Image: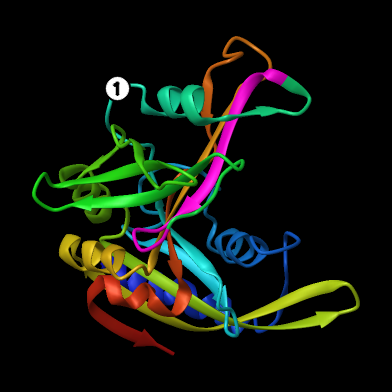
Amino acid sequence: MKSNREFIIEKFREVKALEFVKSNRKHNTGIGKTFEDYLGIVENNLDEPDLAGYEIKAHREESQSYVTMFTKSPNFPAKANAYLNSRFGIPYEDNPSLNKLHTSMFVSRFNTLNGKYSFKLINDRDAKLLKIGVYDINTKTLIDNTAGYTYECLERILNKKLKNLFYVSAEREYRGNDEYFHFNKAEIYSEPSLERFLNLIDEGLIMYDIRIGSYQSGKKYGKPHDHGSGFRILEPNLRLLFNQHETIE
């Protein structure tokens, strides 16, 4: 009986043998969607690994963009998304009675939002909390840091979602307006570390995105809608999260 490792390597080599295949979706997400389609993975937003205990991510060989490590709503306080969106969100242009809050931040620098607020992560190692800091845009006076993540929550999702990562590289070429991929190399990463994650946070290498909207129809009208708030890192730095690494040709 094949192990999970043997199974996923075999599946990768089957796709690799196809050489160039047409992208099943336009733009940045096309590469991941195409590879997962060939593996038979149904697209989802669950916090479970994609296949055989492995999280699957694919990238273009030349890419230097941010890749999502995992998505997770803040775990404190209760109803954190509703609180943040209500207090700091910006009204929709076409529905000003409802708010949205979309912003990206690091621990190492302030951002700006709507000419009023600056957001910055606060890594409180003593309290074992990663907080979302909201500051006055001019004075940089702290306004709020009551929402964020416990270290326990972060460690749990790291070891659940990213315990084993299968990271696939692809050459690409265009044929007319269509993009084609040759998935030609894979790397297996394992043993993610909370301490490594926190160090990458402190070094300003991990970006946190808040992506909260509001339902504008249906039974959930007006309630917060998390569109994928989570942690992202430049693709070449992803390996720094893990203790173990193996290259698959």
Q: Which quarter of the picture shows residue 17? A: bottom right
Q: Is residue 203 magenta?
A: no
| Residue 49, image x, y percentages | 36, 53
Q: Mark 1 — residue?
A: 78
Residue in the foreground of this view, choosing between 97 and 69: 97
Q: Is 9 above or below relative to 227? A: below
Q: Is residue 228 visible?
A: no
Categorize mark 1 by other alpha carbons within 10 Å: few (<14), some (14-19), many (20+).
few
| Residue 45, image x, y percentages | 48, 43
State whether the magenta stretch is mostly helix, strand or loop: strand
Q: Is 128 above or below relative to 21? A: above
| Residue 111, image x, y percentages | 49, 54
Q: Is residue 136 visible?
A: yes
Task: Look at 36% across and 63% down and name the residue there.
Answer: 108
Q: What amino acid is at disc 1?
A: Ala
* Residue projecting furthest to the bottom: 249
Which contiguous range is marked in magenta?
96-109
| Residue 64, image x, y percentages | 55, 78
Task: Look at 70% across and 28% down and name the residue there.
Answer: 92
Task: Look at 59% across and 64% down and name the residue there.
Answer: 38
Residue in the foreground of this view, choosing between 4 and 93: 93
Q: Is residue 188 left or right of residue 224?
A: left
Residue in the foreground of this view, choosing between 248 and 227: 227
* Residue projecting furthest to the front: 139
Q: Secondary structure at mark 1?
A: loop
* Residue projecting furthest to the left: 126
Residue in the foreground of this view, choosing between 224 and 143: 143
Q: Quadrant of the C terminus?
A: bottom left
